[in-house]
Image (spheres, rainbow, N blue to C red):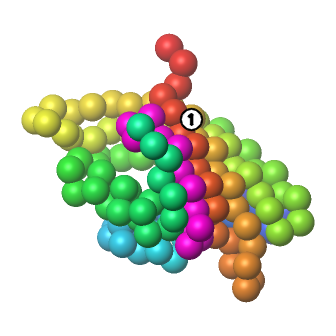
Amino acid sequence: TVRFDDPVRQEIRNTVRAMNDAWTRGDPADLVRFFHRDMVAITPVDRARRNGGATCVAGWTGFGAAAGIHRRREVDPVVHVCGDAAIVANDYGMSFDMGGRTIDAAGRDRLFFAKENGRWGAVADHFSPGPD
């Protein structure tokens, strides 16, 4: 587990960990606690961007229902904070079952957060496969 010396950066890192645990090990519907109502996501599997927190929750929930997720981990996370905004960038690795086979995937993830009412919420996500 990566520990940051700055408590705000660690709080954001803990939020990312809890958010990822919700959709990979828990109930993806819990993402409503982490995704801002106006969240936008750009993914490698969607032709159009996902607009709105509810649409993003539905996308992550759909993936969780279709895939048997074995593991997901963040690699080399970096957290930059600028007032009530933050960006978290990391590589990721995951393994899941889909279509009768096990898939090992790796990529890059960039999450943008804003702090409202004392809580950090994801306002944008952009993830993609990593370069070969």
Q: Which amino acid type is shown beneath numbered disc 1?
A: Arg
Residue at the spot 45% in from the left edge and 60% down from the top edge: 56
Up-down relation of residue 58 to residue 45 (above or below): below
Residue at the spot 73% in from the left edge and 45% down from the top edge: 78
Neighbour tally class for label 1: few under 14, some 14-19, many 20 plus, Cα within 10 Å: some
In the picture as drawn, the residue positioned furthest to the bottom comes out as 117
In the picture as drawn, the residue positioned furthest to the right comes out as 83
On the question of residue 13 being in view, the answer is no
Is the magenta region chiefly helix, strand or loop? strand
Residue 88 spot, x, y in % from top left: 69, 50
Residue at the spot 13% in from the left edge and 36% down from the top edge: 99
Up-down relation of residue 47 to residue 49 (above or below): above
- State yes or no: residue 92 in magenta: no
On the question of residue 46 being in view, the answer is yes
Give the tally of numbered discs: 1
In the picture as drawn, the residue positioned furthest to the top comes out as 132
The magenta stretch is 35-46
Task: Work out whether residue 10 or residue 109 is closer to the camera in this orientation and state it.
Answer: 109
Residue at the spot 44% in from the left edge and 69% down from the top edge: 54
Q: Is residue 7 left or right of residue 26?
A: right
Answer with the quarter of the image where residue 106 lies: top left
SS assignment at label 1 = strand
Answer with the quarter of the image where residue 48 lies: top left
Task: Give the labeled residue for mark 1.
Answer: 108
Residue 74 spot, x, y in % from top left: 55, 44
In the picture as drawn, the residue positioned furthest to the left comes out as 100
Q: Is residue 75 left or right of residue 13?
A: left
Residue 32 spot, x, y in % from top left: 47, 74
